[in-house]
Image (tube, coloured by chain):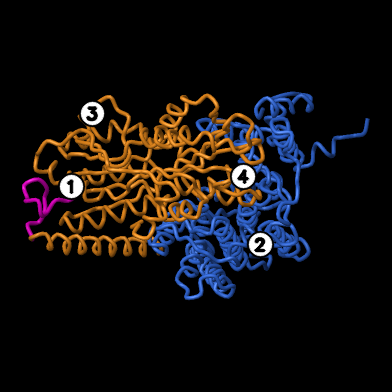
Amino acid sequence: MFKKILTATAGAALIGGLAACGSSSSDGAGSGGSGGSGGSDDITMGFSQVGAESGWRSANTTSIRDSAKTAGIDLKFSDAQQKQENQIKALRSYIQQKVDVIAFSPVVETGWDSVLQEAKRAKIPVILTDRSVDSDDDSLYETFLGSDFVEEGEKAGQWLVDNAADSDVDGNGSIDVVELQGTTGAAPAIDRKEGFAETTKADPTIKVVASQTGDFTRDGGKKVMESFLKSQKGIDVVYAHNDDMGLGAIEAIEAAGKVPGKDIKIITVDAVKDGMTALSEGKINYIVECNPLLGPQLMDLAKKVVAGEDVPQRVVTEETAFDQETAKQVLADRQY
Amino acid sequence: MPDLRPLVRHQLMWPVLALVVLLVVNVVATPSFFSIRMQDGHLYGSLVDILRNGAPVLLVALGMTLVIATRGIDLSVGAIAAIAGAVACTSIAGSSQESATGTAIVAMSTALAVCVLLGLWNGFLVSVLGIQPIIATLVLMTAGRGLAMLVTDGQITTVNNPAFRRLGAGFVATLPVAIIVALVVLGITAVLTRRTALGMLIEAVGINPEAARLAGVRSRTIIWTVYVFAAFCAGIAGLMIASNTSAADANNAGLFIELDAILAVVIGGTSLAGGRFSLTGTLVGALFIQTLATTIPTIGIPAETNYLFKAVAVIVVCLLQSPQARAALAVNRRPAAAPVKAGVA
């Protein structure tokens, strides 16, 4: 009985899906997009997103969806919900659907060789966005478009080195930093940690006294900060690998009766709207930007790659950093 | 020397011992671990954090205990928690008076009503259509987060409402509201299942649904009810999680909480085969899991190995609870306690 219902529902969903496909491809000049030979109008792109774990990621998704529409690229989008196996499944299904180009933000750095080989054998070019993969064979993907996370970590560390005089809040002669890491194994977590550690070596008084993953989420940041506040004495600085964990840390610091931004300095990376608001209110001290609006650049690259043009192996997105003053100025026209 | 055998044989002996060992490890690492002080008119300390952050797991585990007692399992609670948060936050954010208390009450009631509906759906699949519980609830586990994403539009919805904030992050009479709510639900559940025949009926259904039905127990109604209760508890937990950071995160709110809850139930001594259940055991199990989570940053386990640490601790507790494993480890029970310390420290 239930089986029948299930089959019927699945059937209906399938028909619905086909109908949707049909209608979308008829927009694209009706040439019935079996990949490759068509003009730039009917490029089909399969995109596998990490998830929607933060405001940054949501802005990234919106940018990609919107610019695909503007560029006339048929976008097949899937959300991996932070799981590599979901992402590999999505990539395999894009290969089977013979899309013209695959783009994805890898959840973690390793374990991509075999699925990327499959794409290569199917002659489907792959563009990495925002996060890179760790592989010896760089012929597996065309290009990597995204931020330089090591540089972001360095910028964060540099600010602390430059402002070291003000940052020893408790005045005990050492600047005790606690670090809220991103998801363990993710490229931004590894690189932001590395960049920060590298630049802060310049000042021997800066010490990372504790470091733990907060999974890039507010809840994670709050819980980890709560226990840091109890287990570590004299925390001067919080370095969070994204705004959301920083926002969670602010709540934990406030609950401990301290003033975020004054009693404990906060440095984060990303510059999403909620983070920028906190920065302009003085609760965060410094934010290194990680620009999520890479949709237009991605679509340009996709068109070039499909047309067979050469593209550089690495394309870096343009980014800056904000202190409390500049945050106030740019907050009003912040898109995300 | 007093006779310790009844104590050692008590089913809660080992989980409680594991909890105590874990607390001792924390105190050794951070001597001030037990210290509790007043901060801005409320209690502040690691133990308060454990209770407050453990409240959602406890709530979900309570519902799970009753479901498991009927020989079922509910995998959808994490997704239901995410939906509750998403519905409440979207409703508050879309309201014309975002910070009004009334708005929060309406939003939370709507969210809980949605959760009850989802529980009715789960219960319907299991009790009326007779689908295996693990499959029936798998439907919502996978689809539920999609629903939550649909509600929030894939964004993290941040809200600014003091009344809503109180549930997860607020205090009443120096105690966190989350603890009070969780304990009240625990109390009501205990009274309903232990002071009335309901608990016995649930156990009867779990031991043998057919025999229970022939004996005049309405198996179907009871099974249906426990799934609704589980969803309701998950809903409250979801509201707490969203309220804690004043934001609904459809992807991560309550992620894997179903596994934590099942673990809490199992550590507490309730058998997955159904039948006898222990609410006190579930309480101890939930506290153990939350203490474990707090231990990791407190004693400074590196991020790369924290899952391994959790796994080892859980395996040790499970082995301790297994009579066969205990017998194999040592003829004498006292040395059997040694591996806990070795494994956890």
Q: Which mark is residue A226?
A: 4
Q: Residue at x 23, y 38 (%)?
A: A315
Q: CA distance from mark 4 to mark 2?
A: 48 Å
Q: Amino acid at mark 2?
A: Ala
Q: For the stretch drawn in magenta, what is the main secondary structure?
A: loop
Q: Amino acid at mark 4?
A: Glu
* Neighbours of disc 3 within 10 Å: few (<14), some (14-19), many (20+): few
Which callout, 4 or 1, points to the residue nearer the camera? 4
Q: Residue at x 31, y 33 (%)?
A: A133
Please report the bounds of the magenta region as a residue range: A30-44
Same chain for mark 4 and mark 2? The answer is: no
Q: CA distance from mark 2 to mark 1?
A: 56 Å
Q: CA distance from mark 2 to mark 3?
A: 64 Å
Front one among A298 and A229: A229
Residue B273 spot, x, y in % from top left: 62, 48
Residue B56 spot, x, y in % from top left: 61, 54
Chain containing the residue with disc 3: A
Residue at which label 2 appears: B212
Q: Which mark is residue A138?
A: 3
Q: Is residue B128 visible?
A: no
Q: Is residue A6 above or below residue A314?
A: below
Chain containing the residue with disc 2: B
Q: Is residue A148 above or below residue B218?
A: above
* Rendering colour (chain B): blue
- First along the sequence among labels 4 and 1: 1
Front one among A329 and A200: A329
Residue A316 spot, x, y in % from top left: 26, 38
Q: Which mark is residue A99?
A: 1
* Rendering colour (chain A): orange
